[in-house]
Image (cartoon, rainbow, N blue to C red):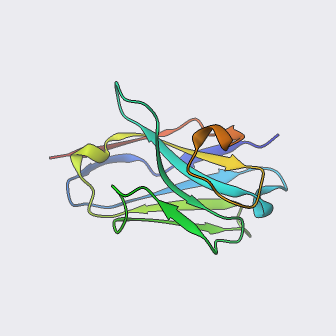
């Protein structure tokens, strides 16, 4: 069993920045890929970013590429999402997820455990 706890969400003006954190329990973190997804009201969940077990490979949705950066600290069992140049359309609940395999994917159904989510609201 893996538990994930997200933090760092909040209200920010357009153009601002936020850093999300996701702390994981369990000894499998360092060998597992991690991902960030988001869901806006009335929309389906969408992929944001993912990172392989070592941090050597990262993947981004086109709409956040160049603005968001995913990283991880295996010593702290934590994955981060640095979000810069935020736009109102980035407003959503952001979820982190763990895939109990070393290779990351962009497919939500391939992740095994999910956090409870953290709200990000970007005002115009």
Q: Which of 119 and 89 lies nearest the eye of the viewer?
A: 89
Q: Give how far across and how far down residue 93 sits, in percent.
A: 43, 38
Which residue is at 82% across, 55% downward?
A: 28
Query: Looking at the image, is 16 positioned above or below residue 73?
Result: above
Left or right of 25 in this view: 45: left
Q: Which of 45 and 23 lies nearest the eye of the viewer?
A: 45
Which residue is at 75% across, 57% downward?
A: 32
Q: Give how far across and how far down residue 71 sits, in percent.
A: 56, 68
Q: Give how far across and how far down residue 52 sits, in percent.
A: 66, 64
Query: Looking at the image, is 118 positioned above or below residue 42?
Result: below
Which residue is at 59% across, 41% downward?
A: 108
Which residue is at 77% across, 55% downward?
A: 101
Q: Which of 59 and 10 lies nearest the eye of the viewer?
A: 59
Q: How many marks?
A: 0
Left or right of 27 in this view: 15: left
Tell me which corner region of the image, top left, top right, bottom left or bottom right, holds residue 110: top right
Q: Give how far across and how far down residue 60 sits, in percent.
A: 46, 60
Left or right of 18 in this view: 23: right
């Amino acid at each position: 069993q893996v538990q994930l706890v997200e933090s760092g969400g909040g209200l920010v003006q357009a153009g601002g920045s936020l850093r999300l954190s996701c702390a994981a329990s369990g000894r499998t973190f360092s060998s597992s890929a991690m991902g960030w997804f988001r869901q806006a009201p009335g929309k389906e969940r969408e992929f944001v970013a993912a990172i392989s077990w070592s941090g050597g490979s990262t993947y981004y949705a086109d709409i956040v590429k160049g603005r968001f950066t995913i990283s991880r600290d295996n010593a702290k069992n934590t994955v981060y999402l640095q979000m810069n140049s935020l736009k109102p359309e980035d407003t959503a609940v952001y979820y982190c997820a763990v895939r109990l395999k070393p290779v990351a994917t962009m497919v939500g159904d391939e992740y095994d455990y999910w956090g409870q989510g953290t709200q990000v609201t970007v005002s115009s």
